[in-house]
Image: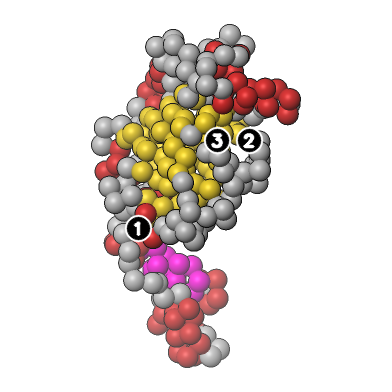
Amino acid sequence: MNKKTLLAATTLAAATALLLAGCSSTPTGDGVDNNAAGDGAPSAKVFEFQTPAYGSEGELTIRIPKALLEAAGSDADGLLVGEVKAKARELDSSKACAFDLEIEYRGDGLDALNRPALTKKEYSAQGEADLEATLMRQFGVKTVEEAEASAPGGAAEVEEIVGNLEQAPYVAMPAWAPLDAKPIDDLDAADPELGRYVSDDAKTLTFVQSCASDALDDGSSDEFDFPIESDGTIDTFASVEMNVMKSGTLTVIEAEVSDYELDSNGDWIGA
């Protein structure tokens, strides 16, 4: 799924009004009404990709709506995460702000996302392919032996090339990059380092980033992708870009859905 439909605010004024409605303690305003939960009840703390942007104080649930899943049909069969709950996280520092994302995996989603992106055999084969491509480009041959016989610098020249291409020891990297984040125990609340952290059980991601100066600050944001498995690879079904203010205000400032969009009647259609 390469094509994405951007659900961005059309004007600054409209986006600001929407965010103010979302941050309200009571569900009022068009932004909230259009962001109704799956059972039809409006919620000021739920974002379902039905508005351009959305804000909430301290806590915000972000979910793929049932209507979108129904419209996507079999295209959504491989969806591995259906919902996340964002919660502002307190830090003992004014240098950064943070929020946790509690992840609701679908089915065996965690196992699929945590499997190695490359097996040891695949990693080795990748290294061999890189070496062969380099030898072909440099000397027009495929093997080290052939290269040593034809290289102007002989074996020494080839040995240097092989050394530069030597692979690092194999490490089983998870198929889903967020699971390769720093362990949460590395987060120092008094002197936080910007970046992503993951809990021991891989069910919570913590985003530590610069504090947003306002709800629409896109220079202090980070992105979360809802992963989907397609043809054995991990792709993005939908994504949200979020920021957080020192007060704990959480804001979805941009949202994307791959290959689907809302029509003027509020129905999900293929894009």
Q: As shown in the figure, which amino acid type bears the numbered disc 3?
A: Thr
x, y percent for residue 100? 42, 42
Q: If you read the primary sequence from the N terminus, does the residue marked by circle 1 or circle 3 appear first? A: 1
Residue 14's quadrant in the figure?
A: top right
- Secondary element at image label 3: strand
Q: Is residue 67 above or below residue 105?
A: above
Q: CA distance from mark 2 to mark 3?
A: 8 Å
Q: Is residue 76 above or below residue 127?
A: above
x, y percent for residue 223? 53, 42
Residue sitting at x 68%, y 27%: 16
* Residue that label 1 marks: 185
Q: As shown in the figure, which amino acid type bears the numbered disc 2?
A: Ala
Q: Nearer the viewer, residue 219 or 134?
A: 219
From the image, which quarter does the C terminus lie in? top right
Residue 104's quadrant in the figure?
A: top left
Assess whether mark 3 and mark 2 are in contact (beta carbons under 8 angstroms). yes
x, y percent for residue 228? 40, 36
Would you say residue 96 is visible in this rendering? Answer: yes
Residue sitting at x 55%, y 89%: 152
Q: If you read the primary sequence from the N terminus, does the residue marked by circle 1 or circle 2 appear first? A: 1
Name the mark nearer the viewer: 1 or 3. 3
The range drawn in magenta is 125-135
Using a 10 Å C-alpha cutoff, classify the residue at mark 2 as few (fewer than 14 neighbours), some (14 to 19) or many (20 or more): many
Q: Is residue 181 magenta?
A: no
Q: Which numbered disc covers residue 149? A: none
Left or right: 191, with 265 as reference point = left
* Residue that label 2 marks: 215
